[in-house]
């Protein structure tokens, strides 16, 4: 079993390659999730801002033309 982990003297290159690929997979999985969360947060904020703007616009007295 120790020989398997030693990889015939190439353990550093083999295991570092596995680590790099694993990190890339994790990044490829997590990055879209974080981006999705950011987009949803921005949409919620813009929706709240629009609602506040509409409420303020309906509450303010309408300008009457002279």
Image (cartoon, rainbow, N blue to C red):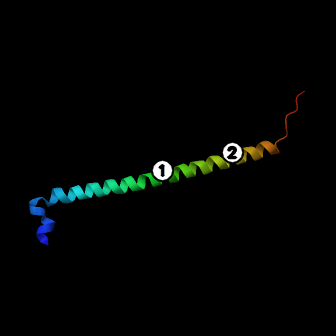
- Helix, strand or loop under label 2: helix
**Residue drawn 53% across the image and 49% down it:** 39
**Residue drawn 72% across the image and 47% down it:** 52
The answer to whether 3 appears left or right of 32 in the picture is left
The percent coordinates of residue 25 (x first, y second) are 34, 55
Nearer the observer, 43 or 8: 8
Residue at mark 1 to residue at mark 2: CA–CA distance: 23 Å
Residue labelled with disc 1: 35
The percent coordinates of residue 46 (x first, y second) are 63, 46
Q: Is residue 42 above or below residue 6?
A: above
Locate the C terminus by quadrant: top right
Q: Is residue 42 above or below residue 63?
A: below
Alpha-carbon neighbours of circle 2 within 10 Å: few (<14), some, or many (≥20)?
A: few
- Helix, strand or loop under label 1: helix
- The single residue placed furthest to the bottom in the displayed view is 1
**Residue drawn 56% across the image and 52% down it:** 40
Q: Is residue 17 above or below residue 61?
A: below
């Amino acid at each position: 079993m120790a020989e398997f982990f030693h990889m015939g003297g190439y353990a550093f290159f083999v295991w570092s390659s596995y680590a790099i690929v694993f990190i890339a997979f994790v990044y490829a999985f997590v990055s879209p999730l974080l981006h999705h969360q950011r987009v949803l947060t921005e949409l919620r904020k813009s929706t709240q801002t629009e609602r506040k703007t509409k409420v303020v616009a309906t509450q303010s007295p309408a300008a009457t033309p002279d």
